[in-house]
Image (tube, rainbow, N blue to C red):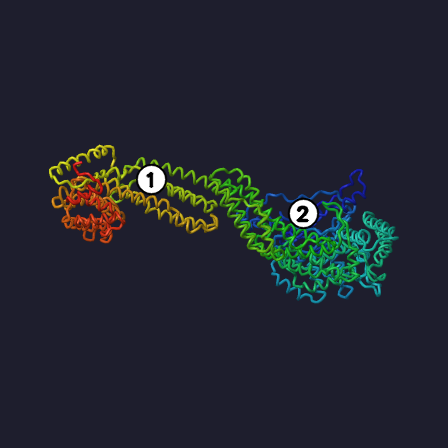
C-alpha cells in the first residue's frame, strides 16, 4: 500500500488585538522549565514512533513530500498521526492491533495523557514555509542515537528533593540547552589539542529503523561495533556524542562551525574562542531542517552568551558595566531580526553580530586568576554557570543502557573532560566535588551501591583547606552565590552549594533509617560515611567553633529514626488491636521490643562505628516512649484484671531487655543511662496486685475447707479410695488456685509465692484442726482410777467389797457415758486415711509449685533473685506438723477407745478377777483379734503399723491399769508372776503375729515396761517393803522401781504383812472402807 506523507494545516494565527510582538517573544522565550522539557520529550517520542511506523515493514511504500529524499528530511512534527495509523490498519487488516492478548495485557490506563498547552505562535514561526528545506538534515536526534535514560528498564527514583544549591538562570536555560552547549565546549577543547576532524556529509539512501536495530542488539555487540568503527580521540568523541544524546546533524554543524571559526586565526587556540559567538557567525540558517529549529538553536546560543558574559561573570564589570547593557540590547536585536523580511533581517543580524563581537570579546578576555589577555576566554567561567555545564559533561560517564553502571570508557572520558577545565575554570577541588555530586545524584536515582562508593572516594579526594594551594584557596573563596529558599535568601560557597544537598538528603534518609535501609545495611553504612564526610568538609568550610561530633550526629539519627518507627508502630498497633481484640499496650510492648531487637542486632553494628553508645540511646529512648504510653494505665490499675495480665508481662519484658541491652555496653555511660531510666515499677505494682488476689483466693479456700468439713460424713469414697471426700475437694480448690496463680503471666517476686505457700499451709492446718476438734477426750473414755486400799483377811467381806466397789466405780462412769459421743472405729480409720491422703499429696503439691516457679523464673516472668533453699524445704512444714500430730492423736485415741471403751468389760473390769489363775489373758485374744481385723480392713497400708502400735500401747496401758490400779477386787501373790509373764508373752506374740504384724523389736520395746512390773510381782513382800523404805529414804530402789509402783504392788498383795505395813506407814484403809 502506498501512503502519501501528508502534513497538517499550518494556517498562521493572527496577532490578538492589543498584543505587541515583543510580548509574544517574551512569552515564547521564557516558558516554564518543566513544561518545556515535557513538550520536548513528547515531540521526540512522537517522532520516534512515527519513524518506526514509516521506516519499518508495516507499510510497503511511503511517498515523500517534494524535496525530501529520506525521513531525515521530513519534519515529522507536521505529519498527521491519525492518517498514518489508519494506513497501517488498512495495510495489516487489523492484525497489527491484535498482536497482543488484551486479556493478559491488563486493563487500559486510567490516567489521561498530559495536555499540551496551546500557545499563540509568534511571527517568527508563522513565516515557516510548509515544505522543509532541501538538502538539509533534521536537527532532532536520530533514532539510532537515542540511547538515553528513558529507554532503560530500570525504575528511576525521584530526585526532586536533591537539587544543587545554585540559583536558577534568568534566561530560562534548560537542561537540554546546557547539555548541547557542554558538548560544543567539549568539541572546542578537543579542537585545541588537534582532535577535531572535519566531518563528511553523506546521505543515507537506504534507511532502516536503526532504533529497532539498536534495541535488538545486545550491549556487548553495540560496544564492539562502535569500537570497530572508530578509535582514539575520534572514537571517544563519537562515544561522547552518543552518551550526551547529540544528533549527528548537530555534531556536524558544530564541528564545521568551529573549524570555520579558526580560519584566519593563526596562533589562536580553539578553546580560547567565544564558542557561542563563533557558532552564531559561522553556522548558517540553511544548515537546519526548518526555520523553527534554527531559531531554537540561535536562541540557545544567545542565552548562553547572556548567562556566561552578563548574568554570571567570573570577574566584575567595573567600567564595563555599560558594555553589559549594550550587549543585552544587541542580543535582543539579533533575535528580533528573524521577524523581519529576509533581506532586512539578515542585514540587521550581521550588523548586530559585528557589534556584539567587539563587546563580547572585550568582556570575555578580561584577566582572571592572573591570566594574560587572549590566553583564556572567560565567557563560560562564571561560577554556577560553568559548573552546571561541567555537570552535564560528567553525566556522560553513565552507561546509556543501564544508568546505574559506569561506562567502560570512564577513564578516557574523565581524561578528555580535563581538556575543558581551561574553558570552564575547573580545578581539582571543583572537579572532585562536582564528580562526587554527579555520582551521588545518580546513586539516588538508581540505588546502585557502587556509585555511592565512587562518590565517597571522590569526596575523600577533596583536599582540606590547609592542603590546597594559595591560588586555589583564593579562587574557591571567591565562588559564592545567593539562593532563595524556604529559609529566605542564603549565601552559599561552592562547597556548600554541592555538599549541603548531599548532607540534607543523607540526613533525611538516616533520620528514618528503619524505613529506608531495612534491607540494605551496606548501603546504609556508606550513606553514613558520605554524610560524615560532607559534614566535616562543611564544618571546615564554615569554620564552626563548636563542631558537631560524629557521635552527636549518630545520636540525632538514632533519636529521630526511633521516634518515626515508634509512630508507625502506634498506627500498626491500633489496627492490630481492632482485629485481634488484644490490649493495645500489650501489643505495643511486644512490637517495641521487636523494634529494639531489630535496631540492636541489625542497625547498631553499623552505627556503632561512629558512636559505640548508639544502642544506649535507642534503648533509653524506646523505654521512655513506651513509658509515656504506659504510665496512665499503671496509675489507674487497682486490682488484677485481664488487661493487667496482658499488659504487665509485655511491659516488664521490654524493660528487662532494655536494661540488659544497656548493661551489655559497659562503661560509665551505660551506668549513667541506667540511673537516668525512670523504671516502670511493674514488679512492685504487680506484686501488690498479686498479693491482693492471693489473699482473696486464700479466703475462698478457707471457706471451702469449712464447707467441706461440715458436709463430710467420713465414709470411704470407694473400696480402693478409703479416704473421705472432703480432702479431695480441698485439694481440688487448692490446685485450681495454684493453676490460676501460675497462669498469671505477670512479673512476680518470691514474696508473692511465699504468701501463696503460707496461705495453702494455713488451709491444711485449719483442715487438720477441724478433724481433731470433733474427737472426744481420751480421759472421758478411761474409767476413773479406784482409790488405794489394803488387803483384808475376810474373803466374804472381800467379795462384798468387790461387788460394792465395782458397782460404785461404774455408776459415775456410766452416767457420764451418756454424754460422750465416741466415734466408731471405722470412722476413726477413715479420718486417718483422709489425713494421710492430705499429707502424702502435700509433697507432690509442693514439688509441683516449685517446679512451675522455677520454670516461671527461667521464662523471665518472675524476679531473677533466687529463693532461699531453706524456705523451699519448710514450705508446708506447718501443715505436715499439724497433720502428723492429728494422725498421732487419732491413732492414740483409737487404741485407747478399743481397750478402755469397746473392751472395757472383758479387759479393764474382769481380767484377773477374782484371781490370776481363774481369769487369764488368753480369753481376751479373740475379741482383740476381732478389733484388730476391723482396723486392718479399713486403714491404709501406710498407717497400719502406726494404728496397731497405738493398739499395742493401749493394751499395755490396760494391763498396767489391771496390775497397779485394779481396785480392791484384784489381789496378787508372788506365784502369780509366772502366769503374768506367760500372759505377756501371749500378748506380745499376738501383735508380732509370726512376722506379719509389728516388728519384734518394736513390740519388745513396748512390753519392757510391763515386764518390769510383772517381775516386781514375783518378789516377796518383805523384799518389796524394804525396797520401798530404801527408795523413800534415798530415792534409790534396789529393784529398779519407783515408790509409787512399789506402793501399788503392796496395795494389791494378798498378805497381812503388807496390809500392816501400809496401815502403819501410809494410813491406807482396808478395802471395806
Task: List the residue tagged with mark 1.
Answer: 769
CB under 8 Å between callouts 1 and 2? no
* Figure quadrant of residue 266: bottom right
Q: Tell me the distance, in whole angstroms, between the alpha carbons under discs 1 and 2.
A: 111 Å
Front residue (pair 878, 109): 878
In this rendering, the count of numbered labels is 2
SS under mark 2:
loop
The disc placed on residue 94 is: none
**Of marks 1 and 2, the one in the foreground:** 1
The reply to whether residue 98 is in sight is yes
816 over 284 or under it: above or below: above
* Residue 426, image x, y percentages: 76, 59
SS under mark 1:
helix
The disc placed on residue 80 is: 2
* Residue 153, image x, y percentages: 60, 54
- The quadrant the C terminus occupies is top left
Q: In the displayed structure, does residue 71 sit left or right of residue 960?
A: right
Query: How crowded is the residue under tag 1: few (<14 C-alpha within 10 Å), some, or many (20+)?
Result: some
259 over 156 or under it: above or below: below
First of labels 1, 2 by sequence position: 2
Q: Residue at x 45, y 45 (%)?
A: 751
Front residue (pair 492, 889): 889
* Figure quadrant of residue 473: bottom right
Query: How crowded is the residue under tag 2: few (<14 C-alpha within 10 Å), some, or many (20+)?
Result: some
The reply to whether residue 282 is in sight is no
Q: In the displayed structure, does residue 596 sit left or right of residue 209?
A: left
Amino acid at each position: 500500500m502506498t501512503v502519501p506523507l501528508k502534513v497538517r494545516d499550518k494556517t498562521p494565527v493572527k496577532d490578538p488585538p492589543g498584543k505587541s510582538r515583543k510580548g509574544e517573544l517574551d512569552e515564547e522565550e521564557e516558558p516554564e522549565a518543566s513544561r518545556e522539557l515535557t513538550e520536548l520529550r513528547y515531540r521526540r517520542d512522537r517522532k520516534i514512533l512515527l519513524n518506526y511506523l514509516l521506516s519499518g515493514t508495516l507499510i510497503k511504500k511511503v511517498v515523500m513530500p517534494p524535496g525530501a529524499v529520506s525521513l531525515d528530511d521530513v519534519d515529522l512534527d507536521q505529519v498527521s498521526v491519525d492518517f498514518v495509523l489508519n494506513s497501517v490498519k488498512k495495510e495489516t487488516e487489523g492484525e497489527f492491533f491484535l498482536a497482543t492478548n488484551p486479556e493478559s495485557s491488563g486493563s487500559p490506563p486510567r490516567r489521561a495523557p498530559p495536555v499540551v498547552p496551546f500557545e499563540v505562535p509568534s511571527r517568527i514561526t508563522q513565516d515557516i514555509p510548509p515544505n522543509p528545506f532541501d538538502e538539509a538534515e533534521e536537527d532532532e536526534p536520530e533514532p539510532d542515537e537515542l540511547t538515553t535514560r528513558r529507554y532503560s528498564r530500570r525504575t528511576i527514583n525521584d530526585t526532586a528533593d536533591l537539587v544543587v544549591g545554585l540559583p536558577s538562570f534568568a534566561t530560562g536555560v534548560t537542561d537540554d540547552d546546557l547539555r548541547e552547549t557542554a558538548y560544543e565546549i567539549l568539541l572546542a577543547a578537543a579542537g585545541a589539542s588537534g582532535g577535531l576532524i572535519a566531518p563528511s556529509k553523506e546521505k543515507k539512501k537506504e534507511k532502516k529503523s536503526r532504533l529497532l536495530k539498536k534495541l535488538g542488539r545486545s550491549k556487548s555487540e553495540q560496544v564492539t561495533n562502535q569500537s570497530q568503527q572508530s578509535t582514539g580521540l575520534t572514537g571517544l568523541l563519537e562515544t561522547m556524542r552518543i552518551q550526551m544524546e547529540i544528533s549527528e546533524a548537530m555534531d556536524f554543524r558544530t564541528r564545521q562551525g568551529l573549524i570555520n571559526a579558526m580560519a584566519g586565526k593563526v596562533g589562536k587556540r580553539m578553546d580560547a574562542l567565544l564558542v557561542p559567538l563563533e557558532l552564531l557567525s559561522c553556522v548558517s540558517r540553511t544548515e537546519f531542517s526548518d526555520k523553527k529549529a534554527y531559531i531554537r538553536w540561535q536562541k540557545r546560543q544567545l542565552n548562553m552568551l547572556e548567562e556566561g558574559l552578563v548574568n554570571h561573570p567570573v570577574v566584575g564589570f567595573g567600567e564595563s558595566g555599560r558594555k553589559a547593557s549594550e550587549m543585552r540590547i544587541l542580543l535582543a536585536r539579533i533575535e528580533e531580526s528573524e521577524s523581519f523580511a529576509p533581506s532586512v533581517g539578515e542585514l540587521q543580524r550581521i550588523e548586530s553580530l559585528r557589534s556584539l563581537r567587539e563587546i563580547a570579546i572585550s568582556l570575555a578576555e578580561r584577566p582572571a586568576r592572573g591570566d594574560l589577555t587572549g590566553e583564556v576566554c572567560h565567557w563560560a567561567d562564571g561560577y554556577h554557570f560553568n559548573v552546571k555545564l561541567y555537570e552535564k559533561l560528567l553525566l556522560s560517564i553513565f552507561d546509556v543502557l543501564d544508568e546505574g553502571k559506569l561506562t567502560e570508557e570512564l577513564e578516557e572520558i574523565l581524561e578528555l573532560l580535563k581538556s575543558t577545565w581551561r574553558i570552564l575554570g575547573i580545578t581539582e577541588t571543583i572537579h572532585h566535588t562536582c564528580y562526587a555530586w554527579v555520582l551521588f545524584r545518580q546513586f539516588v536515582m538508581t540505588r546502585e551501591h557502587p556509585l555511592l562508593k565512587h562518590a565517597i572516594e571522590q569526596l575523600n579526594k577533596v583536599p582540606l583547606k590547609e592542603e590546597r594551594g594559595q591560588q586555589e584557596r583564593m579562587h574557591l573563596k571567591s565562588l559564592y552565590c545567593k539562593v532563595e529558599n524556604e529559609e529566605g535568601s542564603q549565601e552559599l560557597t561552592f562547597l556548600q552549594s554541592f555538599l549541603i544537598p548531599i548532607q540534607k538528603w543523607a540526613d533525611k534518609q538516616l533520620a528514618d533509617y528503619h524505613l529506608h535501609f531495612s534491607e540494605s545495611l551496606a548501603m546504609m553504612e556508606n550513606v553514613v560515611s558520605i554524610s560524615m564526610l560532607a559534614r566535616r568538609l562543611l564544618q571546615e568550610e564554615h569554620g564552626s567553633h563548636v563542631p558537631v561530633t560524629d557521635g552527636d550526629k549518630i545520636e540525632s539519627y538514632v533519636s529521630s529514626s526511633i521516634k518515626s518507627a515508634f509512630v508507625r508502630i502506634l498506627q500498626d498497633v491500633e489496627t492490630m488491636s481492632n482485629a485481634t481484640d488484644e490490649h493495645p499496650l500489650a501489643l505495643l510492648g511486644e512490637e517495641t521490643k521487636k523494634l529494639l531487637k531489630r535496631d540492636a542486632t541489625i542497625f547498631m553494628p553499623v552505627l556503632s562505628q561512629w558512636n559505640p553508645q548508639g544502642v544506649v540511646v535507642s534503648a533509653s529512648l524506646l523505654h521512655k516512649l513506651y513509658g509515656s504510653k504506659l504510665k496512665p494505665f499503671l496509675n489507674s490499675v487497682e486490682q488484677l484484671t485481664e488487661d493487667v495480665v496482658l499488659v504487665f508481662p509485655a511491659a516488664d519484658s521490654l524493660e528487662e531487655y532494655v536494661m540488659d541491652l544497656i548493661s551489655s555496653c559497659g562503661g560509665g555511660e551505660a551506668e549513667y543511662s541506667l540511673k537516668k531510666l525512670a523504671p516502670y515499677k511493674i514488679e512492685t505494682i504487680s506484686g501488690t496486685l498479686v498479693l491482693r488476689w492471693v489473699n482473696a483466693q486464700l479466703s475462698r479456700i478457707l471457706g471451702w475447707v469449712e464447707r467441706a468439713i461440715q458436709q463430710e460424713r467420713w465414709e470411704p469414697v470407694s473400696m480402693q479410695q478409703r479416704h473421705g471426700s472432703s480432702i479431695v475437694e480441698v485439694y481440688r480448690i487448692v490446685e485450681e488456685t495454684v493453676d490460676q496463680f501460675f497462669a498469671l503471666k505477670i512479673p512476680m517476686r518470691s514474696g508473692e509465692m511465699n504468701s501463696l505457700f503460707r496461705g495453702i499451709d494455713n488451709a491444711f492446718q485449719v483442715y487438720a484442726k477441724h478433724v481433731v476438734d470433733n474427737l472426744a477426750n481420751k480421759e472421758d473414755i478411761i474409767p476413773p482410777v479406784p482409790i488405794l486400799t489394803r488387803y483384808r483377811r475376810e474373803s466374804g467381806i472381800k467379795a462384798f467389797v468387790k461387788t460394792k466397789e465395782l458397782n460404785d466405780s461404774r455408776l459415775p462412769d456410766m452416767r457420764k457415758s451418756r454424754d460422750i459421743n465416741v466415734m466408731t472405729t471405722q470412722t476413726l480409720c477413715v479420718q486417718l486415711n483422709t489425713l494421710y491422703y492430705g499429707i502424702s499429696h502435700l509433697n507432690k503439691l509442693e514439688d509441683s509449685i516449685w517446679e512451675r516457679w522455677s520454670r516461671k523464673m527461667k521464662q523471665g516472668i518472675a524476679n531473677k533473685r533466687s529463693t532461699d533453699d531453706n524456705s523451699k524445704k519448710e514450705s508446708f512444714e506447718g501443715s505436715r506438723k499439724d497433720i502428723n500430730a492429728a494422725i498421732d492423736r487419732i491413732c492414740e485415741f483409737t487404741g485407747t477407745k478399743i481397750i478402755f471403751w469397746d473392751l472395757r468389760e472383758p479387759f479393764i473390769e474382769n481380767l484377773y478377777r477374782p484371781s490370776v489363775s481363774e481369769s487369764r489373758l488368753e480369753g481376751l485374744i479373740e475379741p482383740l483379734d476381732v478389733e484388730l481385723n476391723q482396723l486392718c480392713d479399713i486403714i491404709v497400708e501406710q498407717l497400719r503399723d502406726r494404728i496397731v502400735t497405738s493398739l499395742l500401747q493401749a493394751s499395755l496401758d490396760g494391763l498396767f491399769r489391771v496390775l497397779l490400779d485394779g481396785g480392791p477386787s484384784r489381789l496378787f501373790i508372788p506365784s502369780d508372776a509366772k502366769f503374768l509373764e506367760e500372759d505377756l508373752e501371749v500378748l506380745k506374740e499376738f501383735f508380732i503375729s509370726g512376722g506379719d504384724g509389728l516388728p519384734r523389736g518394736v513390740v519388745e520395746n513396748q512390753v519392757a515396761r510391763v515386764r518390769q512390773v510383772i517381775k516386781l510381782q514375783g518378789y516377796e513382800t518383805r523384799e518389796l517393803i524394804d525396797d520401798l523404805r530404801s527408795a523413800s529414804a534415798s530415792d534409790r530402789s534396789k529393784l529398779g522401781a519407783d515408790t509409787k509402783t512399789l506402793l501399788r504392788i503392796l496395795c494389791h498383795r494378798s498378805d497381812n504383812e503388807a496390809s500392816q505395813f501400809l496401815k502403819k506407814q501410809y494410813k491406807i484403809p482396808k478395802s471395806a472402807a
